[in-house]
C-alpha cells in the first residue's frame, strides 16, 4: 500500500523539487493539463515585461536590431535544437504547427522524386491530416493522403509512399512511437519522414540528428510552457537545406530580405522556412521559457515524469472505486509520452467534478479523461492528492451528476 | 512663412491632441516611423499585463473559454471590420500578412474558373510577389505571376488575368491607389481582386464592402499600433465564403474543430481562413490597441494626417537647405497614404543623423528616406521640430559624415 508518507519522502529526494517555485500556480491546484497549455513561469512574466517596457517602448523600431528581434526565430531555434537533439542551424521558431506542417510536407514532397502518397495515421491529430488535404487540392494529383492504423505503421510502408507524417506521442492515447526504428524503416524504402513533436517536445528525450529525421515540427505551448498559442517550430536536416523547396516563400525566407528584390531567392539555411514577420511579444515569452532547459535536462524530466505516472497508477490501482477507469494505450510507461488517458463512461462529468476539487485534467470526446504530467511543477504529493480526489469523486458519484459526455473543449 | 506659433495654434485646436498621452513615447522623440512599427500605448501595456496575470496565470487552460481566447481572431476581425468599412463576419485576425496573402491568392484562384495569371506591380512589397511565386511552384502551370508598372495597372488588365494583387499604399513611394475604380475595372473583366492594406489599415479611410473588394489582407503593427510582428488579418467578401477554397486548411478552420474529425470540412464562415492555434498574447495586444478606434474615426485621423504632412512639406519648402531632398510619389497629398518619401544622395546618412537629433524616420535602399505620420501621437509642433532638425542637419553636412547608403534595416 502506497502511503502519503512515501510521497513526502519522494519529494524530499527529488532534484527538481525547487522548480515548482518558478511557476505562478495557485496553491491547491494540481495542474494535470500542462500537456495542453503550460502555466506561467516568473521568467516568462518577466520576459514579457522586458520586451514591452525595456525594448519596444524605449527603442521602438530600433529594437529589431538593438534587441535582436530579427534573429529571435533562429535564436529560439537553436535553443530548441539543444532540447531536441539537433545541431545548430536546423530549427527555426515561427508560425503555427499547422503552417509548419504544410511547409515540411511540401518540402518533403519536393525531395520525393515523383512519388505522391503521403501516409499518416488515421487517428493522428486532425490538423496533420487536414494540412495534407489542403496541399493535395493545390497540387492536383501530385499529393495524395493515405492512412493506416497506428498499430500497422511499419507494415504499411512501401516504395510508392513519398512522405510519412507521424506524431511522436498520440494526443489521445499518449502512445510514444519509436522514432529511430520507424525513420530507419521508412528511409530503407526511400520515404521522407516528418515528425510532429507537439506532445513530446521538452518532455521526451529526442535525438533528431541521431535518428536521421528529415523534418519535424512542434509547438512550444505545452510542456515547453511558452504561452498560449506560442509560436511553433520547424526542423529540417542540414543535408536537405540545399535541395528542398518550401512554398510559403515569404520575404523573411529570402536570402537577402532587406534588398527588397522583386524575385524570390531562398535563404541557403534554415531561415528559408521563415515566411512573414513573427509575433515578437509571444516569441519573447518562448525565449524566456526555454532558458529553463539551460539548467534541467530532458532526461531528468523524463525520469521524474515516469516516476510520477507510476506513483499515480499504482495508487489508483489500490482503490476499487477506480475500476471504472480504463487506461487507454500502452500499460508499459516507457511506451508512453507524459500523459495518461482513461476511458470512463462519464469522462466529461468526472473531469468537471475533478476540476472543482482542484485537479485539472481535460476531456476528449467521446469518453476520454486525460492527465498530463509535467515534472517541473508537479510533486509526488500532488499525485497523492489527485488520486485521493479521483477516488472520493467516484465514490460520491459526482461524474454522473456533472453531466453527460459532450464536445471536447480547447486542446 | 510658417511660424512655430502657427504650430502651437494648430495643436490647440486639434481634437486629437489628448491621444499623445496614451502612448509611452519619451519626451524629445519625434517618432516618424509609425508606418513601420507603431509605439506602445498604455492600453496595450495593460492588455498584455491582463492576459498574463489575470487570465493565463489564474485560469490556465480554462482561459480559452472563460476569457474568450478561442474567439479572439473573430472578435478582433470584427473590430477591424469597423475600421476597414466591412460588415461583421468577413475578417479574421491571424497569422502573418504573407501567410494570409497565400490564402487569399489561392482562394481567389479557386474562384477564377481556369484562368491562371496573377497580376501584380513590379515594385509591390516583395512578399506579395514571393507568395505568388511559391504558389506557382505548387500549382505547376495553374498559377503564373505577371507584372506591370504601378502607373499602368488599368491598361494591363485583360480577360486572361485571374487575380489582381495590389498594395493600396506603396511601401516605398507612399502612393495611394484608387481602390474603388481599380476593383471595378478588374471586375468588369472577371478578375478577382486582392488588396494588401499593410500601409493603409487604420490611417486611410477604406470601404471594403462598398468597393466590392473580393479579398484583403494587412498587418496590425504599423498604424494600428498592435505591437511588433502582431498578428495580421484577412478579409473575404461574404459572397465568396460559400464557394472558395483555401489550402491552409488547419484544424481551427474546420466546421467543428473540437469534433477532431479525421476529415476536413471547412467552416462556412470567415473562420475557414483560420489554420493553427494563434499567438494569444500578441493577439491580446492587438485587441487592446484597436479599442482606440471606438473613440476616434479613421476620417478624423486622415484629416489630421493630411494637415501634418502639408505643414511639414510647406515648412520644408521654405528652406533652401532642403533642395537636395526630392519628394518621391504624388505631390498631391490626397493621392498618398500617410507617408512621405524623399530621395537624397546620402539618405542613409541623413536618416542616421536625424535619429541622433530625435527625429526617427527610416531608410529604404537605394536612396530613400521615409517619414510616417501617425496623427494619434504627432503634433504640429513635432512637425515644426522635425523640419528644423532636417534643415540644421543638412546645413551641417551631417548626412555625408554619417556614412554611405547601405542595406535597409527592418521594415
Image (cartoon, coloured by chain):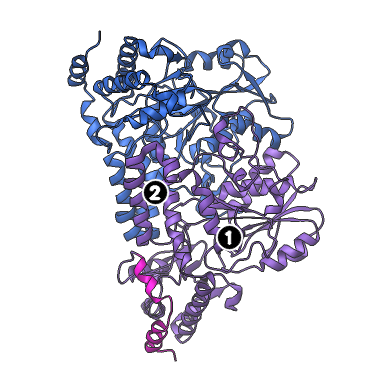
Chain colours: A blue, B purple
Q: Which of the chains bears the disc numbered 1?
A: B
What secondary structure predominates along the stretch shown in magenta?
Answer: helix
Name the residue tied to disc 2. Answer: A281
Q: Is residue A202 left or right of residue A276?
A: left
Segment tinted magenta in the rendering: B1-23
The reply to whether residue A86 is visible in this rendering is no
Mark 2, residues whose alpha carbon is within 10 Å: few (<14), some, or many (≥20)?
A: many
Name the residue: 45% across, 41% down: B65
Q: Which of the chains bears the disc numbered 2?
A: A
Name the residue: 22% across, 34% down: A21
Residue B164, by quadrant, is bottom right
Of A100 and A312, nearer the camera is A312
Mark 1, residues whose alpha carbon is within 10 Å: few (<14), some, or many (≥20)?
A: many
Local SS, label 2: helix
As drawn, the residue found furthest toward the bottom would be: B1
Of B350 and B33, nearer the camera is B33
B95 in magenta? no
The reply to whether residue B316 is visible in this rendering is yes
Name the residue tied to disc 1. Answer: B197
Of A399 and A315, nearer the camera is A399
Q: Is residue B56 left or right of residue B191?
A: left
Position of the N terminus of chain A by quadrant: top left
Above or below A120: residue A38:
below
> Where in the figure is residue B270, as x and y percent of width and height?
62, 48
Amino acid at each position: 500500500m502506497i502511503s502519503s508518507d512515501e510521497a513526502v519522502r519522494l519529494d524530499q529526494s527529488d532534484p527538481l523539487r525547487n522548480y515548482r517555485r518558478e511557476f505562478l500556480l495557485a496553491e491547491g491546484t494540481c495542474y494535470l493539463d500542462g500537456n495542453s497549455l503550460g502555466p506561467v513561469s516568473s521568467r516568462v512574466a518577466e520576459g514579457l515585461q522586458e520586451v514591452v517596457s525595456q525594448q519596444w517602448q524605449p527603442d521602438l523600431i530600433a529594437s529589431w536590431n538593438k534587441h535582436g528581434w530579427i534573429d529571435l526565430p533562429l535564436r529560439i531555434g537553436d535553443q530548441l535544437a539543444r532540447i531536441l537533439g539537433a545541431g545548430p542551424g536546423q530549427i527555426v521558431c515561427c508560425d503555427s504547427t499547422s503552417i509548419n506542417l504544410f511547409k515540411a510536407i511540401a518540402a518533403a514532397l519536393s525531395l520525393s522524386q515523383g512519388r505522391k502518397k503521403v501516409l499518416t495515421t488515421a487517428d493522428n491529430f486532425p490538423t496533420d491530416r487536414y494540412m495534407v488535404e489542403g496541399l493535395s487540392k493545390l497540387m492536383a494529383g501530385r499529393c495524395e493522403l493515405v492512412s493506416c492504423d497506428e498499430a500497422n505503421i511499419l507494415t504499411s510502408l512501401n516504395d510508392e509512399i513519398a512522405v510519412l507524417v507521424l506524431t511522436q506521442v498520440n494526443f489521445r492515447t499518449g502512445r510514444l512511437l519509436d522514432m529511430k526504428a520507424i525513420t530507419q524503416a521508412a528511409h530503407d524504402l526511400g520515404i521522407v519522414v516528418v515528425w510532429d513533436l507537439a506532445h513530446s517536445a521538452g518532455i521526451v528525450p529526442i535525438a533528431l540528428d541521431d535518428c536521421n529525421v528529415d523534418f519535424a515540427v512542434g509547438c512550444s505551448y505545452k510542456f515547453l510552457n511558452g504561452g498560449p498559442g506560442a509560436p511553433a517550430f520547424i526542423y529540417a536536416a542540414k543535408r536537405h537545406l540545399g535541395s528542398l523547396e518550401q512554398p510559403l516563400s515569404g520575404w523573411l525566407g529570402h536570402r537577402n530580405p532587406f534588398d527588397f528584390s522583386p524575385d524570390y531567392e531562398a535563404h541557403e539555411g534554415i531561415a528559408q522556412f521563415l515566411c512573414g514577420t513573427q509575433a515578437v511579444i509571444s516569441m519573447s515569452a518562448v525565449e524566456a521559457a526555454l532558458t529553463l532547459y539551460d539548467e534541467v535536462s530532458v532526461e531528468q524530466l523524463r525520469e521524474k515524469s515516469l516516476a510520477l505516472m507510476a506513483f499515480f497508477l499504482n495508487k489508483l490501482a489500490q482503490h476499487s472505486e477506480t475500476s471504472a477507469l480504463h487506461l487507454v494505450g500502452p500499460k508499459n510507461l516507457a511506451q508512453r509520452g507524459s500523459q495518461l488517458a482513461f476511458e470512463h463512461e462519464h469522462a466529461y462529468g468526472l473531469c468537471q467534478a475533478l476540476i472543482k476539487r482542484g485537479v485539472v485534467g481535460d476531456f476528449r470526446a467521446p469518453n476520454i479523461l486525460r492527465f498530463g504530467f509535467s515534472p517541473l511543477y508537479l510533486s509526488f504529493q500532488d499525485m497523492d492528492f489527485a488520486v485521493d480526489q479521483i477516488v472520493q469523486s467516484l465514490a460520491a458519484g459526482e461524474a454522473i451528476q456533472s453531466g453527460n459526455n459532450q464536445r471536447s473543449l480547447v486542446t
